[in-house]
Image (cartoon, coloured by chain):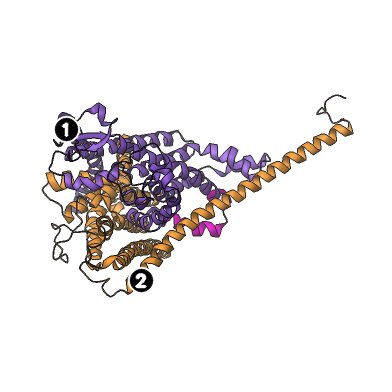
Chain colours: A purple, B orange
């Protein structure tokens, strides 16, 4: 009797403890939104204008670049957000076809030995530290781009000494960072398509390529969409790899030109990583919380979108 | 002459044009198939070569650093303190992360049935997994370092890493628990054991390979993380890092490499070429650690599986 009572007590305790741990996860994400959200709007009561925050291209929360010399801060994050959007879209446009083609090859055509070799490679690459990719970008990619750009630097309006850093290098670095994620999610969604779909298509006399294009890809389309959206969520929040190859402290003079791809530049995450530490304790700090909140909201939208797509997929 | 019809009694001439048309169609389809196949091969080979080239390049350029006598020393020219800190923070984080996320996974898989609560937790996990690590680092700074008065310390870093890796660990552990068949649970319950007894004596031992693999995979993520640690654990070391004190600030391999690349030449006192070697050496160390962690995860998973199925 005593023994079974003790057993039931242990069971109850374990149940409650495990329940608390599960609740903890919800508490963490709610706390992230509350804590960052509570700081995000302070800047607008300290002289920041919510309308110009997203339209002006002048990020100067400390006021050190104020032309009048009064040290009036300016909060214009358009350039930063624009930079994040450029490198995210630029990388995802290249990653999407690469990942889809590789994933289709991987599930439909690849010989077994190749799968056995590629699978671990993809898994390892999903976990490569972003700082290492940034390091490669800085030591291999940037010098290479710089050499390639130098002959035409004048035509693009790029300073020769710093040519090669910038959005172009950041896009290439992001491709390497995002590709494994998109690839592995795409492979999962293609594998979820049952073989009966393949057999039906082949039995109707289609070639392999027709089968992939007309049967497999449409059947897995929502899953593939999820993969791309998750890749974008990863790309927009990527920090150190991007910061090292951007290497800028302000936007280039001509924002809408080809040359802007190949000279030092900024985006949201790089700006935060560079200056948040110094801004802590000053009034400039609040401006960075607003930036963080913008990132948080964007990634939340991406996650909702990916969940919506996943909920619509036929095969899971 | 009228257009060729589908009747079996076609004129020989019309039959011939139909056959040539079909032959042409088949040839076109086969050609497209061949073009597509070679394109797919090409793209996959390019992707694989890029991946391999990056790994080989990092190790190749970093290997000379392993033969520099000061590389494995503490201080500005070596990485011993950073190596110690990386493993310290790894162990400290896992001590908290492992029971918490395994407990949450046990609750979701064993104690509660599929329903709104599980959906909410999964939604929370996906959202948390989508939060950029930099933003989570800022949250960790605000909540742990400032509000809970931990300041910039190893403990604040470990707790931030807990938040960061919770969703991944939960998913991996849930997957591990789900591989255990229903029959085993029901057998244990039918013998009169409580839920917890069936979990402790039946489910957890069977799920052990998956749990260990999950543990090792999260270890890889923790070793490689950098952005979340910038504001919570700092990028500089106190005089003596070789203590178990969780209240001191310290850097890791990743944040140290970031610091070196960000602040430019001169911080290590090695000169340009020496510092380039040091940087490459740190990158190679990180990649090698990651490779080892992945191989160990695979090996351990297979070994434990073997032992369990043999017994």
Q: In this view, does A297 lie to the left or right of B233?
A: right
Where residue B80 appears, x then y in whole percent?
A: 24, 68
Residue B308 in view in this figure:
no
Q: Which chain carries label 2?
A: B
* Image quarter of residue A66: top left
- Considering every residue shown, the one lying at the far top of the view is B2
The label nearer to you, 2 versus 1, is 2
Q: Is residue B290 above or below residue A228?
A: below
Where residue B89 appears, x then y in whole percent?
A: 23, 58
Where residue B126 appears, x then y in whole percent?
A: 33, 41
Residue B283 in view in this figure:
yes
Q: What is the magenta segment's predominant secondary structure?
A: helix
* Image quarter of residue A42: top left
User: Residue at image x 22%, y 34%?
Assistant: A75
Mark 2 — residue?
B64
Q: Mark 1 lies on which chain?
A: A
Mark 1 — residue?
A42
In terms of depth relative to the viewer, which is nearer, B15 or B151?
B151
In terms of depth relative to the viewer, which is nearer, A4 or A38?
A38
Look at the image and say whether residue B281 sits in the magenta stretch. Answer: no
- Considering every residue shown, the one lying at the far front of the view is A154
User: Residue at image x 32%, y 55%?
Assistant: A131
Residue A212, disc: none
Look at the image and say whether residue A120 sits in the magenta stretch. Answer: yes
Q: What element carries label 1?
A: helix
What range of the chain is rendered magenta? A106-123
């Amino acid at each position: 009797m005593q023994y079974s009572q003790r057993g039931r007590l242990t069971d109850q305790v374990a149940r409650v403890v495990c329940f608390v741990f599960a609740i903890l996860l919800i508490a963490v994400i709610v706390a992230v939104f509350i804590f960052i959200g509570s700081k995000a709007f302070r800047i607008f009561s300290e002289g920041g204008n919510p309308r110009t925050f997203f339209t002006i291209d002048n990020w100067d929360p400390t006021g050190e670049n104020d032309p009048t010399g009064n040290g009036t801060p300016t909060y214009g994050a358009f350039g930063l957000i624009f930079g994040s959007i450029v490198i995210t879209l630029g990388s995802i446009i290249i990653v999407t076809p690469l990942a889809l083609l590789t994933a289709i090859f991987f599930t439909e055509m690849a010989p077994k030995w190749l799968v056995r070799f590629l699978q671990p490679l993809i898994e390892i690459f999903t976990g490569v530290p972003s700082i290492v990719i940034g390091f490669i970008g800085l030591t291999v990619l940037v010098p290479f781009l710089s050499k390639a750009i130098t002959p035409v630097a004048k035509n693009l309006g790029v300073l020769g000494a710093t040519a090669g850093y910038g959005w172009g290098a950041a896009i290439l670095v992001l491709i390497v960072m995002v590709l494994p994620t998109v690839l592995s999610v795409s492979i999962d969604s293609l594998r979820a398509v049952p073989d009966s779909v393949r057999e039906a298509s082949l039995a109707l006399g289609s070639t392999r390529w027709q089968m992939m294009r007309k049967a497999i890809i449409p059947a897995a389309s929502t899953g593939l969409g999820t993969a791309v959206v998750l890749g974008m969520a990863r790309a927009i929040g990527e920090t150190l790899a991007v910061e090292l190859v951007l290497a800028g402290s302000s936007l280039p003079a001509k924002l809408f030109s080809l040359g802007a791809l190949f000279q030092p530049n900024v985006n949201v995450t790089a700006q935060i990583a560079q200056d948040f530490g110094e801004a802590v304790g000053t009034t400039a700090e609040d401006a960075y919380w607003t930036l963080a909140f913008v990132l948080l909201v964007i990634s939340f939208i991406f996650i909702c979108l990916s969940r919506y797509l996943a909920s619509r997929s036929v095969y899971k | 002459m009228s257009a060729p019809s589908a009747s079996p009694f076609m004129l020989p001439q019309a039959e011939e044009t139909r056959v040539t048309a079909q032959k042409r169609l088949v040839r076109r389809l086969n050609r497209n198939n061949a073009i597509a196949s070679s394109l797919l091969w090409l793209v996959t080979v390019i992707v694989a070569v890029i991946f391999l080239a990056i790994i080989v390049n990092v190790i190749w350029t970093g290997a000379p650093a392993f033969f520099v006598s000061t590389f494995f020393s503490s201080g500005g020219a070596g990485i011993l303190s950073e190596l110690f800190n990386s493993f310290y923070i790894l162990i400290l984080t896992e001590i908290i992360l492992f029971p918490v996320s395994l407990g949450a996974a046990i609750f979701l898989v064993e104690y509660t049935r599929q329903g709104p609560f599980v959906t909410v937790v999964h939604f929370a996990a996906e959202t948390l997994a989508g939060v950029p690590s930099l933003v989570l680092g800022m949250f960790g700074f605000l909540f742990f370092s400032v509000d809970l008065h931990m300041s910039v310390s190893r403990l604040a870093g470990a707790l931030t890493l807990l938040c960061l890796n919770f969703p991944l660990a939960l998913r991996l552990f849930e997957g591990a628990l789900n591989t255990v068949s229903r029959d085993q649970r029901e057998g244990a319950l039918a013998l009169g054991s409580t839920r917890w007894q069936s979990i402790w004596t039946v489910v957890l031992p069977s799920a052990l390979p998956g749990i260990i693999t999950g543990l090792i995979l999260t270890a890889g993520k923790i070793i490689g993380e950098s952005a979340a640690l910038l504001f919570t654990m700092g990028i500089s070391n106190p005089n003596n890092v070789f203590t178990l004190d969780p209240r001191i600030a310290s850097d890791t391999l990743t944040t140290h490499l970031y610091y070196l690349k960000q602040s430019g030449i001169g911080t290590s006192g090695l000169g340009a070429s020496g510092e380039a070697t040091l940087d490459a050496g740190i990158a190679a160390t990180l990649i090698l650690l990651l490779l080892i962690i992945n191989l160990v995860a695979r090996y351990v998973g297979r070994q434990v599986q073997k032992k369990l199925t043999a017994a």
